[in-house]
Image: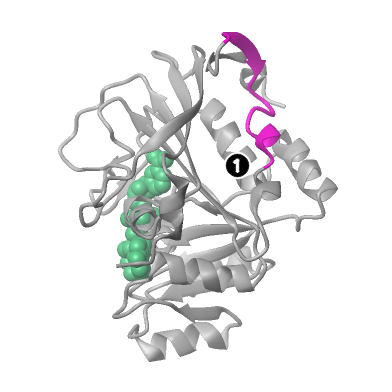
């Protein structure tokens, strides 16, 4: 295990204030157990600066990347713990294009480092496969096959709209990838995607992509929980991403605070808050899509 991840965090909410081990903090949430047959538990996580940046323009200016100032191994440990509880990751076509450019943050979890051995053991003890399967949301179907090679031991789905390019879809299917069409045009409908994935018996779905994917899930009111790390830094920058991008959510998605910890140990010059939020009104989950 890493020395830095052995330092505790301080729980601020629910009261009372208490020091807790960082390692195991999120594994204890048992997200896999929260999924019901036909209705997987859907969760996401972001690390953001105080001014709301989750990504800034890369040095080459070709894509956006998680800022070096915010990325840190304590948050990364919790990210791995969240992934450890998933039987399916939802990511984006853009991730694989970035990954070929060497601009993706890292390999998709679970990470192979020894420091995460206990997370692998946690999975094995619950009968989960060594690695979560992968669903890639994409309109363009521009997904470089070479970037998928490291993940061929997992089931891979590409989720797209009804009118996405049939030749590209066929080329993906020819390599053993399951293509799911859910949504008019080329855009995925979040609720229909969830229904389809539930039919494949997934129980805990972890969305690790960025603002457009997260917005798709919010629009369909299918997010059960948001893990949000707020690093206490202000970054500025002219070209950036925030948590969500898409049409106005009407009504706005209210989120109630479920948990909050303060971490004084990272990033180096600041500290960070680990927040856990759930939809204020879970009943909205039952509303039909507009
Ligand atoms: N700080 C953090 O915690 C954090 C977390 C996640 C990501 N990020 C950063 O945020 C930036 C953006 O990440 P991202 O590109 O993965 O984010 P994204 O904006 O969620 O994904 C964009 C791509 O996802 C596909 N997509 C999204 N919604 C779709 C829908 N409804 N239907 C069909 N396809 C859809 C499209 O792929 P196609 O282009 O293939 O059609 C689209 O170009 C990156 O720099 C990433 O590193 C930061």
Graded by Cα atoms within 10 Å as few (under 14), some (14 to 19) or many (20 or more), the crowding at tag 1 reads many
Q: How is the image coloured?
A: one colour
Residue 158 higher or lower than 226, as above or below: below
Q: How many marks?
A: 1
For residue 134, side relative to residue 159 (left or right): right
What x and y, as percent, mark residue 273?
45, 21
The residue located at (66%, 57%) in the rendering is 36
Residue 28 higher or lower than 243, as above or below: above
**In which quadrant is the N terminus drawn?**
top right
Q: Quadrant of residue 217?
A: bottom left
Residue bounds of the magenta highlight: 16-30
Q: Judge whether residue 133 is colored magenta.
A: no
What x and y, as percent, mark residue 68?
38, 32
What x and y, as percent, mark residue 141?
38, 76
Q: Quadrant of residue 288?
A: bottom left
Nearer to me, 172 or 85: 85
* Residue 102 visible, this orientation: no
According to the image, label 1 marks what residue? 82
For residue 51, side relative to residue 22 (left or right): left
The residue located at (73%, 40%) in the rendering is 119
What x and y, as percent, mark residue 127?
82, 54
The residue located at (25%, 26%) in the rendering is 235
* Residue 44 visible, this orientation: yes
For residue 73, side relative to residue 289 (left or right): right
**In which quadrant is the C terminus drawn?**
bottom left
For residue 222, side relative to residue 201 (left or right): left
The residue located at (42%, 77%) in the rendering is 182
């Amino acid at each position: 295990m890493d020395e830095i991840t052995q330092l505790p965090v301080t729980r601020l909410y629910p009261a009372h204030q208490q020091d807790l081990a960082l390692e195991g903090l999120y594994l204890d949430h048992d997200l896999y157990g929260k999924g019901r047959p036909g209705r997987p538990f859907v969760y996401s996580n972001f690390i953001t600066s105080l001014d709301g940046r989750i990504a800034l323009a890369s040095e080459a200016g070709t894509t956006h990347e998680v800022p070096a100032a915010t990325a840190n191994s304590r948050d990364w440990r919790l990210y791995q713990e969240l992934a450890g509880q998933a039987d399916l990751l939802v990511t984006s076509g853009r991730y694989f294009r970035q990954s070929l450019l060497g601009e993706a943050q890292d390999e998709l979890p679970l990470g192979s480092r020894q420091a995460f051995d206990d997370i692998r053991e946690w999975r094995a003890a619950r009968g989960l496969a060594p690695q979560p399967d992968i669903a890639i949301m994409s309109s363009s179907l521009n997904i470089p096959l070479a970037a998928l090679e490291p993940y061929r031991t997992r089931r891979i789905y590409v989720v797209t709209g009804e009118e996405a390019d049939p030749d590209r879809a066929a080329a993906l299917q020819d390599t053993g990838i399951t293509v799911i069409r859910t949504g008019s045009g080329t855009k995925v409908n979040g609720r229909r995607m969830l229904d389809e994935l539930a039919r494949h018996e997934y129980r805990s779905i972890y969305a690790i992509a960025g603002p457009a994917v997260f917005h798709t899930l919010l629009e369909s009111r299918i997010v059960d929980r948001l893990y949000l790390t707020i690093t206490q830094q202000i970054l500025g920058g002219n070209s950036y991403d925030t948590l969500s991008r898409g049409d106005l959510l009407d009504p706005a998605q209210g989120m109630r605070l479920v948990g909050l910890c303060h971490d004084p140990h990272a990033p180096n010059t600041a500290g960070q808050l680990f927040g856990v939020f759930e939809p204020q009104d879970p009943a909205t989950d039952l509303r039909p899509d507009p």
